[in-house]
Amino acid sequence: MVLQAVFALTLFLSAALLFLVQPMVGKLLLPLLGGTPAVWNTCLVFFQSLLLAGYLYAHLAIDRLGVTRQARWHLLVLLLPLAAFVVAGYFVGSPVPIVVSLLPTDEEYPIFPLLAMLLLAVGPAVWVLATTSPLLQRWFAALSSRDPYPLYAASNAGSLLGLLAYPFLVEPYLSLTTQQELWALGVVVYLGLTLSCAARLWSRGVDSPSPPPPLPSEERGEVINAPSEPSSSPCERPTLARILRWVALSALTAALLCAATTHLTTDLAPMPLLWVVPLALYLGSFILVFWHWPAALHRFCGRLMAMLLIFLVLMLMTRSTEPLVVTLGLPLVTLFVITLVCHGELALDRPAKEYLTSFYLFLSLGSVLGSLFCALVAPLLFHRLGLVEYPLALVLAALVRPDTAIDRPCLGDWLAPLLLGGATAALVLAVPHWLGPTPDTNDPNYLMDRIVRVGVMFGVPSVVAFALVRRPLRYALALTALLLAATLDVGPSGVVLHTERNFFGTLRVTRSQDGRFVRLVHGTTQHGQQALESDDPLKPLMYYHPTGPAGRVMRALPPQRRRRVGAVGLGCGAMAAYAQPGEQWTFYEIDPAVIRLAKDTRYFTYLERCRGELTIVPGDARRMLEREADGSFDILILDAFSSDAIPVHLLTREALALYVRKLRPEGVLLFHVSNRYLDLAPMLGRLAAAHDPPLWAYVDQDVPTPSQQEEGKFASTWMLLGGDQVHELARQDRRWDRQPETEGSLWTDTFSNLLAVWRRGEE
C-alpha cells in the first residue's frame, strides 16, 4: 500500500501541475499577443502535442531499454526542467524574459513565434510531466502484481484538482509572477518524488515481471476495470482493429469536449469560467471508470445516453436557449454520460500491463486528433456552416453502445432515416403555411404558438426516431436526418442571411421575422442592428441609440473636442453614424470577418455612408494603440466583446494607462460594460481612482422605454472616465451617476479575478 501511495501521489502532482500551467501560460501570453482565441487554440494544440510526445517517449524507451534501464536513463531526462528554469528565469520573477523578443510587431497571427516561445518557456518541464502517467504505471507494474490501471484515476484526479484550483484558488489570490515561481517549485517537488519511485526500481533490479494471474471469472463479470475479455491471453498483442478502436473512442470524446464547450460558451451562455465544467466532467469520467466501474452501471449509461441524445438533438433543432438551467444542464449531462460510456469501453478493453504504454500512447493520439479537428480544422472546413462538429460528434456517439454490436447495414438502415428526414423537412416547410406568421415575442400567444409549431415539426419526428434506437446505425442516421431537416426552419431569431466562422467564433447576419431589422450576431449576443424600413436607416440602434449614453456624449461634445475619435470594436459600424465632416474616426477590430460584414452593403451601410474620414485597423487594439502617437485622440470608445465577454486584457491597469496616454489633455474615455454575468463598473472605478493622477468615473445604466424598445433600442451600461472635462459632462447630464469608491483588488496584466466581479444572485 505504501508503494502504491507514493506512485499515486507522484502521478497526482504531475497531472495537477500540467493543468495549472496551461491557463497560467495562456493568461501570460494574452497581453503580449492580444486577446485572440487563436492564442488559446495554439496553446491547446501545443500542450496536447507535448503530451503525445511524452507518451511516445515512454513507450519507445521502455520497449527498447526495459523498465530498469529506462528508469536509469530517465534520471538525465529529469534534469531538463531544472536547466530550463535557469534559462527562462522562473526564479527571478520575470515571465519568460528571453523569448518575448521572438514575437513579431506586425498584426499577423504569430503562430510559429508563439510555439517557439512556449517551447522555450515551459516545453521541457511540460514534456517531462507528460511522460509521468504511462512511465510510473509501468514502473509500478514491474514492482507489484497489483493492477496498475487504477493509478490512472489518481492522475486524472490531479488533473481535476489543477483545473478547479486555478480559477477558484490560484488566479483570485496570486499574481502571475508568484504563480510561475510556485509552479516551478512544484515541479522540483515532483522531480524528487519521481526520483524516489525510480530508486525503488534500481534497488530491486526488476525488469521483466511475470504476467499477473487472471482475475476470477465472477469479478470479470461484475467490474469492468479488469483485463480485457476479448484477449485470449493476458499478454496477447493488441490487433490493429483494437488499436483503431482505442484511437476512435478517444478522438470522439476529445472532439465532443471541444465542440460542447464552444457550443455552451458562445451559443448558449457566454459566462466566464463555464468552460471549466465540461472539462471537469470529462476528467471525472476517467476517474470513475478506471477506478471502480460496475458493468451494470456501464450498460445503464449506454441506454441513458441513447435517450439523452434524442432530447439534446430536439433542443438543437428548436434552437432553444431558455430556460438556462435546461439548455445548459442537458448538454452537460449528455456529455458526461457519453464520456462515461466511451471511456468505460476503453477501460473494459485495456490490454495487459506489458502493453500499457502503447495503450496510453494511442489514447493520447486520439485526443490530439480530436482536439486538432475541432480547434484548427473545423473552423476552416465548416467556414460557412457554423458549429457543425457538435451535432456530428453527437451522431457518432450514437454508434457507441455497450453490449450492442453494429449490425451489418441493410436497406432499412438507410431507407427509414431517409423517409424520416423527408417527412420532417415537409413538416418544417408546411407548418408555417398552416399556422401563418410567427407572432412577435412580446405577443401573449407567442409561447403557445411556439410549442405547437415545435411539437408538430420536431416533436413527432423525434418520437419516430427514438423508435429506431435498437439498431445503432439506423438511430445515428435518423438523428442526422432530423438535424439536416431542421436547417430549413427559420427559427425564433429570424432568417439567417449569412454565416461565417473563423478562429474568433461564428458570426451570423440575420433578418428579424417582421423584416424590420438586419442584425450582426456573435454567439448569443447581438453586436449590431440596422433598420431596413425606417425614415432614418442610418440611425444608430441597440446600445448606440441617440438617446443612450454613447449618443448623448457624442452630442454633448463640441466639434473641437471630437476631431479624432478612436473606437475599439467595430460591430456593424453603428458608431460611425455619429462621425461628422472633418472628423477622423479610427476603428480597431481583431476579427477580419467582422470588418468584411460591416463593409458589406447588402447588410449594413453605416460605414459606406460615414460622413467623417474613416480608418479601420485590423488587429488587437492594445498592440495597435501602442503604435499611435501619445495625445492623439479626443475620444476613445472601448466597445470590444467576444460574444458577451469583454477581453480581460483590455480592462487592466496597464491598459487604462495606455488609453490615457493616447488621449489629448481634455480627452474622454467611454467604456461599454454591459454584461449579463459580470458587474465591471466597480472594478473600473477602482482602476480610475488608482490612476496617477486619479480619474473621474461615472456610470449610466440606461433602460429604454417601451416605444424606444419598439424602434430597436437595447438596455446598456456605459462608463465615462477622464479628467475634469468628464466631471463637467456629467454635471450637465444628470443621468450620469458618480461611480462610488469600493474596496477590492485591481486588475493588472499579471492579476485578474473574475469571481470578484460576478453579479451575485443573477444568472
Image (cartoon, rainbow, N blue to C red):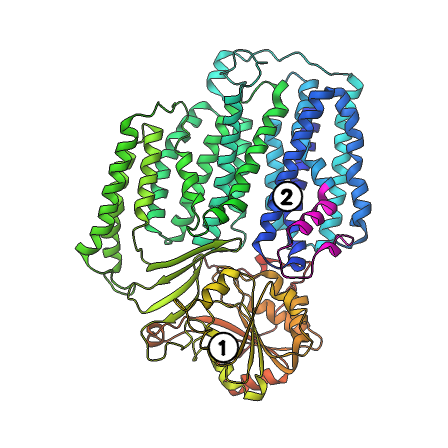
Vertical placement of residue 722 versus 19, above or below: below
Residue bearing mark 2: 46
Vertical placement of residue 294 versus 285, above or below: above
| Residue 280 showing in the rendered view | no
Vertical placement of residue 161 versus 199, above or below: below
Instruction: Give neighbour class at mark 2: few <14, some 14-19, many 20+ (Cα, 10 Å).
Output: some
Looking at the picture, which amino acid does disc 1 mark? Answer: Ala
- The answer to which quarter of the image holds residue 704 is bottom left
Q: Which residues are magenta?
A: 96-123
x, y (%) of residue 186?
Answer: 74, 41
x, y (%) of residue 481?
Answer: 31, 40
Residue bearing mark 1: 550
x, y (%) of residue 386?
Answer: 43, 51
x, y (%) of residue 173?
Answer: 67, 55
Q: Is residue 110 magenta?
A: yes
| Residue 681 showing in the rendered view | yes
Residue at left offset 78%, top offset 48%: 88
Q: Is residue 307 left or right of residue 194?
A: left
